């Protein structure tokens, strides 16, 4: 592994990722097979990753491991059902013990997430979708089950805010021109007995003047 400035970086292998993602530590090994057959070059190979740590401005991954079997090296393409796992994805709430099944499209221009899962906020997150790096719009569907509202509230760092219960539902995520949007998300309390309580010493003016609805929150 090599984490220096001259080390091989993710954008060197996958140009579609662009700059800004660095390899802090990783061990890579692989093989490549080249065959000249009937006047044409055929190729395949494999790449194995262990102990991977990636860092970007807003997120990071620890414990990234897995193997990719390539059915073609030029342009690069994998078979379906490739497996990767990670210990922790750090982006707001940490996602633990993640597992992915995926396929890489020709030339790393497409990433098909056949399935992805991990433990989030004491619950479970599942995802699937296709990222076409040459398209203007990306979409990934997230399925959430039993996410702890108390764990989510801890991100707000507001001591007076108390949330109880769990959330289950579906969150479609769209990415267009670097902007993230969430259209038509559906989340519900499960079971429907959660509680939201916010009792600051001095209520914000917006709540203090919100009448009966504000009083419900402050009870």
Image (cartoon, rainbow, N blue to C red):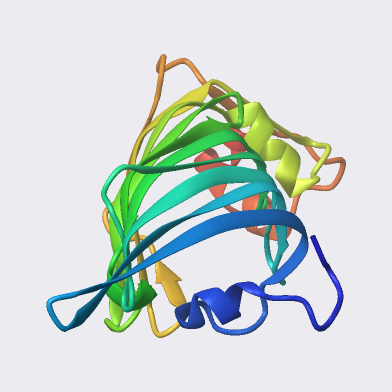
Q: Is residue 147 left or right of residue 115?
A: right
The part of the image, by quadrant, that contains residue 33 is bottom left
- Residue at figure coordinates x 58%, y 79% from the top left: 11
The part of the image, by quadrant, that contains residue 91 is bottom right
Image vertical order of residue 93 relative to residue 25, above or below: above
Q: Position of residue 96 (x, y in %)?
A: 63, 34
The part of the image, by quadrant, that contains residue 24 is bottom right
Total numbered circles: 0
Image vertical order of residue 191 relative to residue 40, above or below: above
- Residue at figure coordinates x 74%, y 38% from the top left: 154
- Residue at figure coordinates x 73%, y 55% from the top left: 26
Q: Is residue 167 left or right of residue 133?
A: right
The quadrant of the image that shows the N terminus is bottom right
Say which of 181 and 153 sits in front. 181
Image vertical order of residue 67 relative to residue 38, above or below: above
Q: Position of residue 111 (x, y in %)?
A: 34, 63
Q: Position of residue 127 (x, y in %)?
A: 36, 44
- Residue at figure coordinates x 64%, y 58% from the top left: 206
- Residue 171 in view (yes/no): no
Among all residues in the image, which is located at the extreme left?
A: 38
Image vertical order of residue 152 relative to residue 25, above or below: above
- Residue 196 in view (yes/no): yes
Q: Is residue 8 left or right of residue 184?
A: right
Say which of 164 and 203 sits in front. 164
Q: Position of residue 148 (x, y in %)?
A: 58, 26
The quadrant of the image that shows the C terminus is top right
Say which of 208 and 14 sits in front. 14
Say which of 20 and 5 sits in front. 5
């Amino acid at each position: 592994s090599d984490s220096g400035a001259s080390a091989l970086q993710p954008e060197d292998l996958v140009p579609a990722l662009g700059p800004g993602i660095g390899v802090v530590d990783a061990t890579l090994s692989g093989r490549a097979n080249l065959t000249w057959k009937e006047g044409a070059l055929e190729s395949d190979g494999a790449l194995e990753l262990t102990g991977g740590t990636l860092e970007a401005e807003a997120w990071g991954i620890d414990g990234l491991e897995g193997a990719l079997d390539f059915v073609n090296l030029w342009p690069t393409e994998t078979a379906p059902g490739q497996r990767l796992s990670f210990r922790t994805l750090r982006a707001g709430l940490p996602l633990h013990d993640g597992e992915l099944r995926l396929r890489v499209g020709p030339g790393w221009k497409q990433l098909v997430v056949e399935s992805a899962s991990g433990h989030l906020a004491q619950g479970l997150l599942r995802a699937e979708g296709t990222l076409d790096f040459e398209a203007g719009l990306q979409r990934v569907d997230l399925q959430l089950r039993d996410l702890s509202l108390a764990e989510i509230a801890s991100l707000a760092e507001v001591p007076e805010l108390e949330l109880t219960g769990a959330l289950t539902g579906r969150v479609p995520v769209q990415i267009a021109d670097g902007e993230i949007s969430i259209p038509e998300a559906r989340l519900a309390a499960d079971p429907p007995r959660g509680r939201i309580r916010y009792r600051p010493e001095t209520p914000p003016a917006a709540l203090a003047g919100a009448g009966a609805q504000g009083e419900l929150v402050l009870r």
